Amino acid sequence: MRSLEALDRMLDQEHDALLAGNLQGVLELSAQKEKLLQRLAGDSAGMNAAGVAVVKDKAARNAALLGAARRGVAAARDRLQQIKTGGTVLNTYNKHGERAALGGAIRRVEHRA
């Protein structure tokens, strides 16, 4: 199997794993993809312009999905941290669309017996 065809198939597998939320599968494919890219660098005879264009489009598509996955994981991490701290700070957005915290932590009255 030529390296470019193998990379094309691997990018499809990566796409399927990203859509399924299988981040472990994406990680495993990443190591395989790196080895394949190294092999591909020395196999320019098996490349054609149309095949390279298809692989480039699939790589861009997967990069966008990886970015979305990264943002999703970061949002989940932030939400878990907010739940852990009790959500005592009011978050809002400023005029630039950036998240900002309003006020400080809400102080609770401690009742002693």
Image (tube, rainbow, N blue to C red):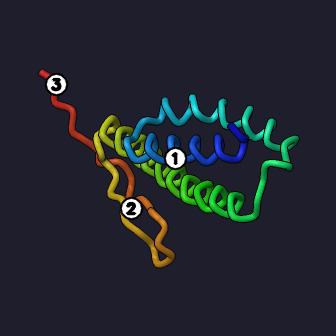
- The answer to which of 35 and 46 lies nearer the viewer is 46
In the image shown, does 102 or 100 lie closer to the viewer? 100
Q: Determine which of the numbered discs, if any, sits on residue 102 in the image.
A: 2
Residue 23: x, y in percent?
47, 35
Q: Residues within 10 Å of mark 2 (few under 14, many from 20)?
A: few
Which amino acid does the dot numbered 3 rest on? Arg
Residue topped by disc 1:
12
Image x and y of residue 4, in percent: 70, 47
- Which residue is more in the foreground, 11 or 82? 11
Amino acid type, mark 1: Asp
The secondary element bearing badge 2 is classed as: strand
Q: Is residue 20 above or below residue 101?
A: above
Q: Position of residue 28 (x, y in %)?
A: 57, 28
Horizontal arrangement in the rendering, residue 30 relative to residue 22 (left or right):
right
Q: Amino acid at mark 2?
A: Leu
User: Quarter of the image containing the N terminus?
Assistant: top right
User: Which residue is at a point 29% across and 48% down the rendered structure image?
Assistant: 106
Horizontal side of 12 relative to 42 (left or right) equals: left
Q: For the residues marked 1 and 3, what is the alpha-carbon distance in whole angstroms? A: 62 Å
The residue under the point 44% across, 44% down is 16
Sequence-wise first label, 3 or 2? 2
What is the total number of numbered labels drawn onto the structure image? 3
Q: Which residue is mark 3?
A: 112
Location of residue 56 in the rendering, given as x and y in whole percent from the top left corner:
67, 59
Crowding at dot 1, Cα within 10 Å, few <14 / some 14-19 / many 20+, comes out as some
